[in-house]
Image (cartoon, grey):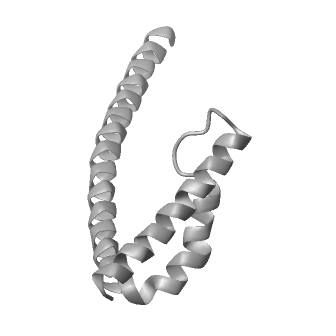
Amino acid sequence: MTCLQVHLHYRRVMNRLLRDHDAAVEADPTHTGLPQAFVDWTWQSWLPRNMHRYQAQVEEHIRYLDLKIGNLNNSLEQIAGCVLDDRYAAADLRDRLQRELDARETP
């Protein structure tokens, strides 16, 4: 792709974004962010037609997302592990105290 072709390609995508944004704001003046119509068009039309141009970037992003998911899973396991440890400790203490209370009430 030449520099001019790249520029025209990005310009078409930006024009689509702006057109969809204008339509979304017209329908709802409080609209912010990416318009759903643009997101849908990107996934359903643009990406399948242009995957050959961006395959390397997509593969790199998938690797990044794999690492991110792994890091998030580790964080969740650590957080959940701490919460579960606290829950088990509280439940154990409750049970021990209840047994002590039950033992006092029994003559």
Return the residue found at the far front: 4
Q: Quadrant of the N terminus?
A: bottom left
Q: Quadrant of residue 104?
A: top left
- Residue 98's place in the image compared with 36, above or below, is above
Q: Nearer the viewer, residue 33 or 90?
A: 33
Whole-percent x, y for residue 39 in the image:
57, 62
Return the residue found at the far right: 27
- Residue 8's place in the image compared with 33, above or below, is below
Q: How many marks?
A: 0
Q: Nearer the viewer, residue 86 or 62?
A: 62
Which residue sits at x=41%, y=23%? 94
Which residue sits at x=51%, y=78%? 47
Q: Nearer the viewer, residue 58 or 64?
A: 58
Residue 21 located left or right of residue 100 = right
Residue 106 located left or right of residue 81 = right
Residue 19 located left or right of residue 91 = right
Which residue sits at x=34%, y=62%? 69
Whole-percent x, y for residue 79 in the image:
30, 43
Which residue sits at x=41%, y=90%? 52
Whole-percent x, y for residue 74 in the image:
27, 56
Whole-percent x, y for residue 85 in the image:
31, 39
Q: Quadrant of residue 65?
A: bottom left
- Residue 103's place in the image compared with 66, above or below, is above
